[in-house]
Image: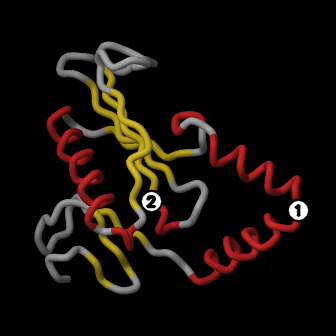
C-alpha cells in the first residue's frame, strides 16, 4: 500500500502506521449498497413522504443520529485524529470525509467539562449510518456509567 492511504477497492483513512496497519481504518463501499442508495435517490424525487423522511434524517444533529462510538486513549491522540479527519476532508474529496461537529470542554453546548467529542461522517460508505463519534476523556476522569 502506498503512502497515499488508498488501495482500490479498499480505502484506508487515518495515520500512516507502517506495514502492520495498526490503527488503520478500512472502508469498503460495495456496488450493492451503491445500487440501494441510487434507487432511494430516484424514489426520493418522486415520493414526497420518502423525501421528507430522508431530509429529516439528514438534518438530525450528529449525536442524535445512528452512529458508532470510539473511545480514544488520550486527548492528545483524539486531537491528532480530529486534525487528520479535517485534513482528509480538505485534501481527499474522494473519501467524502466530513467533520460534522467537534466539542471540547468549555465549548458552547459541550456535555461535560471533561469529555471531548467529534462526529466524523464517512460519505464513501453512503449517505446514512456512516457517522463515527470519536471520544476522549480529560486525564483523571472516569466515564459515567
**Residue at the image point whose x is 69% and y is 76% from the top:** 38
Q: Is residue 93 above or below residue 97?
A: below
Q: Nearer the viewer, residue 108 or 116?
A: 108
**Residue at the image point whose x is 36% and y is 21% from the top:** 143
Q: Position of residue 119 (x, y in %)?
A: 42, 42
Q: Which quarter of the figure has residue 12?
A: bottom left
Q: Which quarter of the figure has residue 47?
A: bottom right
In the rendered structure, the answer to whether residue 80 lies left or right of residue 102 reads: left
**According to the image, label 1 marks what residue?**
47
Category of crowding for the residue at label 2, using alpha-carbon neighbours closer than 10 angstroms: few (below 14), some (14–19), many (at least 20): many
- Most distant residue in the left direction: 18
Q: Position of residue 134 (x, y in %)?
A: 36, 41
Category of crowding for the residue at label 1, using alpha-carbon neighbours closer than 10 angstroms: few (below 14), some (14–19), many (at least 20): few
Name the disc covering residue 122, or none. 2
Q: Name which of mark 1 and mark 2 comes first in the sequence.
A: 1
Q: Of discs 1 and 2, which sits in the foreground?
A: 1
**Residue at the image point whose x is 38% and y is 73% from the top:** 94
Amino acid at each position: 500500500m502506498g503512502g497515499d492511504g488508498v488501495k482500490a477497492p479498499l480505502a484506508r483513512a487515518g495515520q500512516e502506521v507502517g506495514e502492520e496497519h495498526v490503527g488503520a481504518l478500512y472502508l469498503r463501499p460495495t456496488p450493492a449498497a451503491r445500487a440501494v442508495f441510487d434507487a432511494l435517490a430516484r424514489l426520493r424525487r418522486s415520493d414526497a413522504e420518502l423525501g421528507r423522511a430522508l431530509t429529516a434524517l439528514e438534518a438530525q444533529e450528529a449525536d442524535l443520529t445512528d452512529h458508532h462510538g470510539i473511545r480514544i486513549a488520550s486527548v492528545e491522540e483524539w486531537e491528532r485524529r480530529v486534525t487528520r479527519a479535517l485534513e482528509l476532508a480538505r485534501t481527499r474529496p474522494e473519501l467524502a470525509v466530513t467533520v460534522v461537529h467537534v466539542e471540547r470542554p468549555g465549548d458552547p453546548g459541550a456535555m461535560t467539562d471533561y469529555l471531548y467529542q467529534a462526529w466524523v461522517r464517512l460519505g464513501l460508505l453512503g449517505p446514512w449510518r456512516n457517522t463515527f463519534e470519536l471520544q476522549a476523556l480529560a486525564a483523571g476522569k472516569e466515564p459515567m456509567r
